[in-house]
Image (spheres, helix red, strand yellow):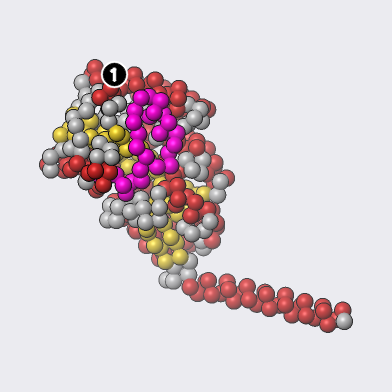
C-alpha cells in the first residue's frame, strides 16, 4: 500500500516537473512579449522613442520577442496602467508624476510644486540629486525606472483672454482624474476644478463643461485645445516630468543580453527627448499661433501676483501632495543651485 502510494506520488511529481519544463520550453520558443502603455498620442515623439527602444531590445532578446506599444490612453489613464503592471497585464508604462505618485508619492516633488522650478537646468539638478533615492523607493515597490523624461512646461489655455489669478477663479478648469490632492488644492485656493480624463478634454471644451485647460503645448497641439481655447497665458506653471517604468517581475524575466540592450536603448531614448525639450515648446507655440492662438505674456506685476499665489499654495502642498521631507530637500537643492550660478 505505502509502496503504491509512494510510486504514485513520485509519478505525479515527475509529471509536474516535465510539465513545468515543457511550459518553460514553450515560453522560450514563443519569446517574451513586452506590453508598454502610454497616454501619449500615436506618432508623437514619445511614441517613436518607445518604438526605437523596443526594436533594439527585441533584436537582443531574440527573434521571437515582441514589443507592443499601446498609445492614446488605450490601456486607461496612468493610474490604471500602474494597476495593470502590478497584476501582470502590462510590462511597462510611460507615465508622468501623476502615475508615478501612484507607486510612491516622493516623486511628486518634481512636478507638483507650482512655480518652484524656473528652468530645465534646475529640474535636472534636483532630479539627479534625488534620483538614487527615488529609484530605490520605486524599486522597493516593484518597479524599475528605465529612463526619465520631460513633456514641456504647463501653460494655461482658455476660451477668454484670462491673465490674472483672480480672473481664473471664475473659470471652469480641467483637473486630472485620479489626482485628488490637486483638486482639493485648487478648491482651497478658490478655483473651480472639473475632474476629467485626458480623452474628455476636447469634447468638454466644446460643450462648455470646462473653459480652461492647464497643459503643455504639445498636448494642446495634439488635442487641438487651442482651436476652442485660443488664448494662452505663458506662465511655466510646473514642468511635466515623468519616466518609463517597468514591473520588476518583467525586468527579472529578461535575458542578460536583453537587459543590457534595454538599458542602453532607454538611456538613448531619454537623451533624444532631452535634446528637443528646450526648443519643442517654442516651435509648437509658433505652430499654434499660425492657426490663431493668442499668447499673453504676463507683466512683471502680474507675474508677481502669480508667484504670490504659488507661495501661498506651498504650505498646502508640503506634507499633503509632496512629502514634507522631500519638499524641503527640493527647496534646499534649488537654493544651492542658484547660489552656485551666482
Residue in view at x 42 percent, y 71 percent: 63
Q: Compared to 10, does 249 lie above or below?
A: above
Is residue 254 visible to the viewer in this orientation of the structure? yes
Is residue 270 magenta-colored?
no
Q: Secondary structure at mark 1?
A: helix
Look at mark 1 in the image and give the residue it sits on.
Answer: 304
Picture coordinates of residue 330, whole percent (x, y): 45, 28
Foreground residue among 162 and 108: 162
Figure quadrant of the N terminus: bottom right
Q: Is residue 55 left or right of residue 129?
A: left
Is residue 201 magenta-colored?
yes
Foreground residue among 265 and 174: 174
Picture coordinates of residue 212, whole percent (x, y): 26, 35
Crowd tier of the residue under label 1, counting other residues whose Cα lies within 10 Å: few below 14, some 14–19, many 20 or above: few
Residue in view at x 72 percent, y 75 percent: 13
Is residue 128 visible to the viewer in this orientation of the structure? no
Number of marks in the rendered image: 1
Residue in view at x 38 percent, y 29 percent: 186
Residue in view at x 36 percent, y 53 percent: 73
Would you identify the image quadrant in which residue 4 lies?
bottom right
Q: Is residue 9 left or right of residue 1?
A: left
Would you identify the image quadrant in which residue 240 lies?
top left
Foreground residue among 157 and 322: 157
Picture coordinates of residue 123, whole percent (x, y): 38, 33
Would you identify the image quadrant in which residue 243 lies?
top left
Which segment is the magenta one? 177-202
Foreground residue among 121 and 233: 233
Amino acid at each position: 500500500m505505502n509502496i503504491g502510494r509512494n510510486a504514485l506520488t513520485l509519478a505525479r511529481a515527475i509529471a509536474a516537473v516535465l510539465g513545468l519544463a515543457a511550459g518553460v520550453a514553450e515560453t522560450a520558443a514563443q519569446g517574451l512579449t513586452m506590453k508598454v502603455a502610454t497616454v501619449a498620442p500615436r506618432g508623437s515623439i514619445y511614441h517613436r522613442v518607445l518604438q526605437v527602444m523596443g526594436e533594439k531590445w527585441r533584436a537582443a532578446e531574440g527573434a521571437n520577442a515582441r514589443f507592443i506599444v499601446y498609445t492614446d490612453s488605450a490601456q486607461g489613464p496612468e493610474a490604471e496602467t500602474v494597476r495593470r503592471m502590478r497584476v501582470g497585464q502590462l510590462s511597462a508604462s510611460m507615465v508622468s508624476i501623476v502615475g508615478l505618485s501612484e507607486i510612491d508619492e516622493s516623486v511628486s516633488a518634481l512636478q507638483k510644486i507650482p512655480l518652484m522650478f524656473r528652468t530645465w537646468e534646475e529640474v535636472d539638478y534636483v532630479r539627479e540629486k534625488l534620483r538614487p533615492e527615488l529609484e530605490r523607493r520605486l524599486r522597493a515597490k516593484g518597479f524599475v525606472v528605465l529612463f526619465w523624461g520631460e513633456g514641456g512646461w504647463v501653460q494655461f489655455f482658455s476660451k477668454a483672454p484670462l491673465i490674472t489669478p483672480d480672473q481664473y477663479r471664475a473659470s471652469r478648469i480641467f483637473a486630472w482624474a485620479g489626482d485628488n490632492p490637486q483638486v482639493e488644492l485648487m478648491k482651497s485656493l478658490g478655483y473651480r476644478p472639473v475632474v476629467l480624463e485626458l480623452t474628455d478634454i476636447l469634447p468638454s471644451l466644446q460643450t462648455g463643461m470646462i473653459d480652461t485647460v492647464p497643459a503643455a503645448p504639445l498636448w494642446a497641439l495634439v488635442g487641438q485645445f487651442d482651436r476652442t481655447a485660443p488664448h494662452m497665458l505663458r506662465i511655466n506653471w510646473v514642468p511635466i516630468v515623468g519616466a518609463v517604468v517597468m514591473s520588476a517581475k518583467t525586468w527579472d524575466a529578461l535575458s542578460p543580453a536583453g537587459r543590457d540592450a534595454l538599458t542602453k536603448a532607454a538611456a538613448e531614448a531619454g537623451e533624444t527627448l532631452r535634446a528637443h525639450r528646450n526648443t519643442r515648446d517654442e516651435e509648437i507655440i509658433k505652430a499654434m499661433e499660425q492657426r490663431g492662438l493668442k499668447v499673453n505674456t504676463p507683466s512683471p506685476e502680474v507675474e508677481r501676483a502669480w508667484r504670490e499665489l504659488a507661495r501661498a499654495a506651498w504650505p498646502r502642498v508640503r506634507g499633503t501632495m509632496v512629502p514634507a521631507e522631500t519638499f524641503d530637500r527640493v527647496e534646499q537643492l534649488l537654493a544651492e543651485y542658484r547660489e552656485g550660478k551666482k
